[in-house]
Amino acid sequence: QVQLVESGGGLVQTGDSLTLSCVVSGSTFSRYNMGWFRQAPGKEREFVAAISRNGDRLYYTDSVKGRFTISRDNAKNTLYLQMNSLEPEDTAVYYCAADSGLVTGRTTSDYDYWGQGTQVTVSS
């Protein structure tokens, strides 16, 4: 059973930084393309960033380009999301997800496994 556990969320102020982590267990981490999604209250879960199995392809939603960086350490079975210049609009529950498909997915339906989420709150 593949398990994903996020950590690193919290309450920060506008302009601050946070780094989220997601540890994967129960399967070979390098088999999966990985993604970060977020869900704000009353809104649908949306794509934030994705990274291919070996880390050579990165994808971001427009609103976080230049501020967020996705990375992975296959030796540590860990996915990261470095978030800089945080804005109140970034407030959401952030989820990591694993995708066993051939192409790095950017929609929720592309992903097979999900973590429980970690709350990020940015105050103005």
Image (tube, helix red, strand yellow):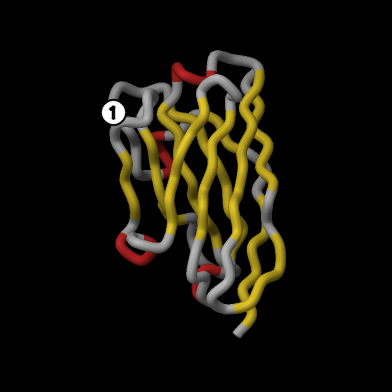
Q: Quadrant of residue 18?
A: bottom right
Question: Residue 64, percent across and down?
Answer: 39, 62
Query: In the rendered view of the protein, which quadrant contains the N terminus?
Result: top right
Name the residue rendered at 52%, 37% in the picture.
97
Q: Is residue 124 above or below residue 64?
A: below
Q: Amino acid at mark 1?
A: Val
Crowdedness near tag 1: few (<14), some (14–19) or many (≥20) residues, C-alpha within 10 Å = few
Per the image, the residue denoted by label 1 is 103
Q: Is residue 77 above or below residue 5?
A: above
Mark count: 1
Name the residue rendered at 35%, 23% in the picture.
101
Question: Residue 9, percent across and down?
Answer: 68, 56
Query: In the rendered view of the protein, which quadrant contains the C terminus?
Result: bottom right
Q: Residue furthest bottom?
A: 124
Question: Residue 114, percent across and down?
Answer: 58, 36
Q: Tell me the element at label 1.
A: loop
Q: Quadrant of residue 34?
A: top left
Name the residue rendered at 49%, 46% in the picture.
36
Q: Nearer the viewer, residue 93 or 56?
A: 56
Question: Residue 85, percent across and down?
Answer: 48, 70
Q: Is residue 52 above or below residue 85?
A: above
Left or right of 98 in this view: 4: right
Q: Is residue 54 above or below residue 57?
A: above
